[in-house]
Image (cartoon, grey):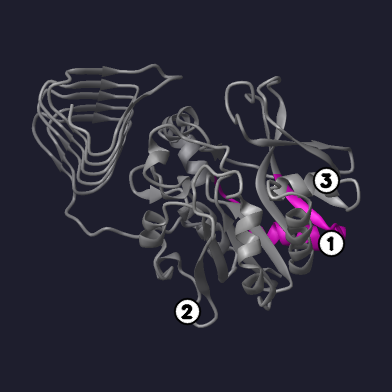
Amino acid sequence: MAASAFGIVSSADNTIHVEGLHDYRPIGAFSFLGRFRVIDFPISNMSNSNINRIQVYVRSRPRSIAEHVGSGRHYNINSKRGKIQLLFSENSSSRSIYNNDISAYADNLDIIQRMHQDYVIIAPSYMVYKQDYRQLLDEHISSGADITCLYHKVDNAREYFRNCHTINVNRQKGVQSIDKNLGTANNKNILMDTYCMKRDTFVELVKDASWMSSMYTLADIVNIMCKQMDVRAYQHKGYFATLTSLEDYYHASMELLDYDTASDLFKAEWPIYTRTTDSCPTQYYDTAKVTDSFVSNGCKIEGTIENSVIGRSVVVRKGAVIKNSIIMAYAQIEEGVHIENAIVDKWAHIIHAKNIVGEPDAPQYIKRNDTL
């Protein structure tokens, strides 16, 4: 059935801001586990579900997403029928209340209406999960619902998933309302900002939301329509992370250093595609000691690394110690530096600051291109 659906990859709501990292790129372009970008997950889910027409919406700082996604050939999309389109919003001010998902869809409504597929699957570029959208589409069609939402049951909503939406579901899996997670309870149904509906239904929702309020998002209009339409919920099982805060991004990366957790997300039969970077293998020197870590290619490791994610072409000098941290591509960590519970952005050079230590629930962030 999935051949009859096209895909939309949406941008994060402008109420979401990930401290530091977000200043340079949208969440979809964040490096994840050293070799991926966050946007690789929704596009790979679509590609593996035989969805070959994909629209990627970019609402601010488009360069890094445009560079990474490019023609989309590396996502194994059918080259004859398939196509990835990057679509932009007329309002590119990153923190403007008017720069939301509905305004981006409204700006490109003619392109959406020209799609030949009867159904649309909308997925976010700021969440990490694995899902066969063919199952979601089949369930949606067989239920006869107007809209089907993907959700995930969590028991740690007080600590994590802040700023995410939650859904209230009745016994028949009907969605009664959509709210914001305010951290008031641990057990919540987190809306994965993933929807399945007819293309024509989607077009009407965009028009209705634009007419009602310039501030309305897709979640807002679906919440209103819960009273008038048949909105159903479909439960997701397996690994799920939202990257809507620096703490959530750090927590998700550390969580996936556990082999069993990572094995749940990465399956040989469900590859996560990304743009490959050709560089030499990582060199480990005699003084290197690395345990429980993801280390990307092109690195030079002379120091100690424990339970950390190391991006491409990172240099870690002799005597340097990195624990429970994320070091992004091209960073250089000089001799004798101790880094713990920290996120070091690309091209940072740590020389004189010998002790950079954050807390597991409040990681330290080092700016891109910074010298310390």
Which of the pair 88/132 is nearer the observer?
A: 88
Q: Quadrant of the N terminus?
A: bottom right
Q: Nearer the viewer, mark 2 or mark 1?
A: 2
The Cα atoms of the two marked residues, 1 and 3, are separated by 24 Å
Task: Report which quarter residue 349 is drawn in.
Answer: top left
Q: First in sequence, mark 3 or 2: give its number.
A: 2
Element type at marker 2? loop
Residue 89, placed above or below residue 168: below
Q: First in sequence, mark 2 or 1: give its number.
A: 2
Which of the pair 259/357 is nearer the observer?
A: 357
Q: Nearer the viewer, mark 1 or mark 3?
A: 3
User: Can you identify the residue that label 2 sits on?
Assistant: 79
Please say if the residues under marks 3 and 2 sit with CB atoms less than 8 Å apart. Answer: no
Amino acid type indicated by mark 1: Ser
Amino acid type indicated by mark 3: Ile
**x and y percent of residue 6 in the render?**
64, 68
Amino acid type indicated by mark 2: Ser
Which of the pair 77/203 is nearer the observer?
A: 203
Question: Which contiguous range is marked in magenta?
Answer: 128-150
User: Can you identify the residue that label 3 sits on?
Assistant: 224
User: Can you identify the residue that label 1 sits on?
Assistant: 142
The Cα atoms of the two marked residues, 2 and 1, are separated by 30 Å
Element type at marker 1? helix
Q: First in sequence, mark 1 or 3: give its number.
A: 1
Q: Residue furthest bottom?
A: 80
**x and y percent of residue 311 in the render?**
28, 42
**x and y percent of residue 4 in the render?**
69, 73
